[in-house]
Image: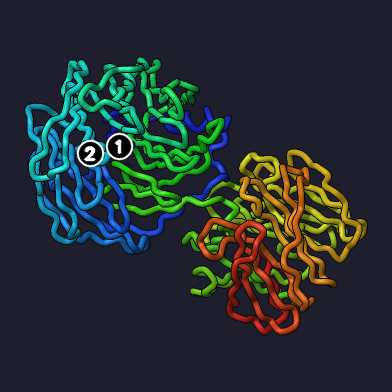
Amino acid sequence: MKKKSTILCSFFVLWLVLILGGVLHAQGMNIFKLGETSTGNTYQDIFVLGDYAYCVSGTTGLDIINISNPAAPVKVGNVSTPGNGYQVFVLGNYAYIATSGSGLQIIDVSNPASPSIAGNFSYIGYAVGIHVIGNIAYLLDNSGLFLVDVSIPASPSEISYFYIFSESAYAHKDLLVQGNYAYVASYEEGLMVIDISNPVAPASVAGYSGYYLNIDKVGNYILAANYKWNNSNYLTTFDKVEVSGPPTLSGSLTLNGAVNDVSGTGDFTYASVDGNFLYLLNTASNPLLAGQYDSGTTNDSMVAVGNLIYMTGGGKLMILQASSAGMHLPDFNRDGNPDILWRNTTTGGNRVWFMNGVTTSGNASLLTVTDLNWHIAGSADFNYDGETDILWRHAVNGKNLIWFMNGVTRIGITYTTVLSDTDWDVGAIGDFNGDEKADILWRNKTNGQNVVWFMNGTLRTGTANLLTIADLDWEIGGAGDFSGDGKSDILWHHKTDGRSIVWFMDGVVRTGYIYLTALNDFDWRMTATNDFNGDDKADILWRHVTDGRNAVWFMDGSVRIGFAYLDAESDLDWRINN
């Protein structure tokens, strides 16, 4: 959750090899930088509440940064504090700072532009952790846990103290309070669980040996990072402690390398290393690497709130966004908004509309492909570099080609498996076997068969047959998660009667279906599914084939909750090929 280790992570590549068996990138999530601000300060900790990030430095006190616009965060206030700030917690109008040498400092932040010290709880020692619930502040120092009454911020008072042995000033590293328990991470005493249901008499209830430095809550678990030296490198074991009942160690995942900060949100854990990298682990069940981000500077501290990550390093506060890899592709300018990919069926021109929701914010031309037998079949990140790549299919010779892209610049090509039967067309791209990688859904325009190619990047690793739909007027409109189970479902549209239907899928097995709102104007064609309003739910992109209008249906699962028109493209030779 907070504090950092001074251990250097020299072996992060080995960590990735351990998780992925040599694959150094994962497609499950994409991480984008939305914005940053430079302050010049090195921050020990960060706390986010509402429109503000509260960043504590060991030398300059507390900086308050307005993050209401993630693309342009701006520092609005500062207050100097005695001692070295180590950890911060914000509740209501007050920020509580654990400092080494000056105890607990309470800051009035009701006016973010002019924060001021409201009170303090001083003692001889080194405070390293803080958590506040109601009128009680839980303050971790080098020898134990203070429970402090902060109902009157100007004059906080001790309620009780729980002694925890340590031989060094900073042995105890991190603190988390959940329900009736306080969790203390220590590299001397391990992971300690303290019953705080009676504030005047806290008591030890459990303990796990190890060298713990970081801790945070993820779902129904506490996730604690445990370090050890193993021959020539450090190992990090993420121990999962069940907290829905009495604290119970329920599992762990060991990785090569050392992490300096962890933060959990939903089913995901973000792990920052003593280097440039931020790793995203899906810890819902069996932990796996779901994404990574190279900040280009040494990371200090971070916290995740929803799908946004606030990370400090190199004298900056960076705001990142994590989203499902398929949800926002194509995204050629890496701003977290899905773009629209076009091909001209007469000239062979190709272009991208950069989108901000349903507003066109710009455009760019791609390389022209004058052989009109080449059709854009879809887009995905096929080489796991965080960029949108383009899949092509040749309508005459059955070749399939992938353009590797850097933004709108083609940086390489590769051919994948040839499918010489040109009655097969690509219907959609999705993940149909749960490996977090883009698979290819095919439909046969002559016999109505449907097949999935399971892909490992550009390599086909297997195939599976889906139900056959003999009525050839049914066209695949896209693949997206319309049931909220995290799995790719299949969207269909009937081009002659206007009906639309979603197949709910469990991999390649149809588990159910539902009809969507029917269209009476049969000239509307489904062209793609994507998230156009930022709610992380699949919406539907339409194009009118006779008048050039374009529209989005905003969806909540399989329910249409609204719609919006996009810019029209009256030249009907331009086709959407997302």
Give the amino acid at mark 1: Lys
> Hey, which quadrant is residue 379 in on the image?
bottom right
Residue underneath mark 1: 2
The mark that comes first in sequence, 2 or 1, is 1
For residue 87, the mark is: 2
Q: Say which residue appears at 55% left-offset and 32% top-offset.
A: 285
| Residue 222 visible within the image | yes
**Please, what secondary structure does the residue beneath circle 1 have?**
loop
At which x and y percent is residue 84?
13, 38
Q: Dot 1, how many residues are within 10 Å of its Cα: few (below 14), some (14-19), or many (20+)?
A: many
Q: Quadrant of the C terminus?
A: bottom right
Q: CA distance from mark 2 to mark 1?
A: 7 Å
Residue 354, placed above or below residue 175:
below
Circle 2 Cα neighbour tier, 10 Å, few/some/many (<14 / 14–19 / ≥20): many
Taking depth in this image into account, of 22 and 229 the one nearest to the observer is: 229
Q: Horizontal and vertical percent for residue 169?
A: 16, 23
Q: Do residues under tags 2 and 1 come within 8 Å of each other at their CB atoms?
A: yes
